Image (tube, rainbow, N blue to C red):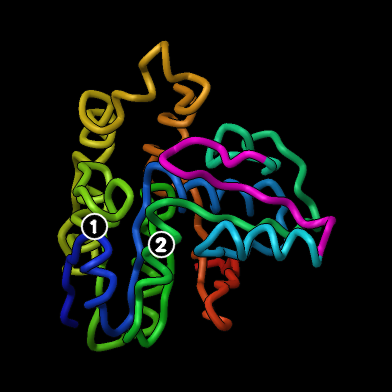
Amino acid sequence: MNVRILHLLKGAEQAEGLTVVIDVFRAFTCECWMYAAGAEKVIAAGTLEETFALKKEHPDWILAGERNGIMVEGFDYGNSPAAFEHADLKGKTVVHTTSAGVQGLTAVRNAAEIVTGALVNASAVVRYIRERNLETVSLVAMGWNGIRETEEDELCAEYMASLLEGRSMPDIEERALQLRYQEGKKFFDPARQNVFPERDFWLCVRPDIFDHVIRVQNHGGLFETEWTAS
């Protein structure tokens, strides 16, 4: 198995084989919590225009997401996992748009298959990759807005690569907690709690708490996802 770690939007464009688009803070952690809250389906949309158009066609659908971390005006939710931790989304469809993770999905051109990745389900993603047994695996760390590398996505990619190569990472929990002093420090800024609540940090950095994988299907630029046990 040829495992490559790629970076940012440019890396998503270069991805081949089974592609994992990684966004720990917060898009694909958030989608795990959406499904855990009972969502029937999560649809990722690249643009705000697409998102609002889907809402117009389906008034009962829920809109969630952000631009530059901030909840979009007119949306039901932002991109905060904490907002979904105790939510009841049973039977609901959520349309999700973000500045990094979802943009990574739209940038992938040559993948044989796409799944999302986060620390919270990293081992489940690795098990799924092994079951699929494809020759090439691309791990794309999306970073901030797809233009700047960030420690949490690089760590997640490194963790997945190590497991795929048969190497354990016994200090993964410790390294994940250290993110609070790196990209994660924004979650501890009292002035930014309305955008980056501290609870989000703790929900994003707990490795392997979900045993499901989010599979992605591209339908004309809209990305329907599926919550699959691994």
Provide the residue designation for mark 2: 103
Q: Secondary structure beneath disc 2? A: helix
- Viewer-nearest residue: 85 or 141: 141
Q: Are marks 1 and 2 in contact (CB under 8 Å)?
A: no
Give the residue type that dot 2 points to. Answer: Gln
Provide the residue designation for mark 1: 157
Q: Magenta region: which residues? A: 58-73
Question: Which residue is at a point 29% across and 46% down the rendered structure image?
Answer: 144
Q: Could you give the CA–CA distance between mark 1 and mark 2, rounded to whole angstroms?
A: 18 Å
Q: Residue furthest top?
A: 190
Relative vertical location of residue 96 with respect to residue 17 in this rendering, above or below: above
Verify whether residue 66 appears in magenta. Answer: yes
Between label 1 and label 2, give the one nearer the viewer: 2
- Viewer-nearest residue: 140 or 202: 140
x and y, in percent, of residue 64 in the image:
62, 47
Q: Residues within 10 Å of mark 1 (few under 14, many from 20)?
A: many
x and y, in percent, of residue 179 in the image:
25, 31
Q: Secondary structure beneath disc 1? A: helix
- Name which of mark 1 and mark 2 comes first in the sequence: 2
Question: Which residue is at a point 37% across and 47% down the rendered structure image?
Answer: 24
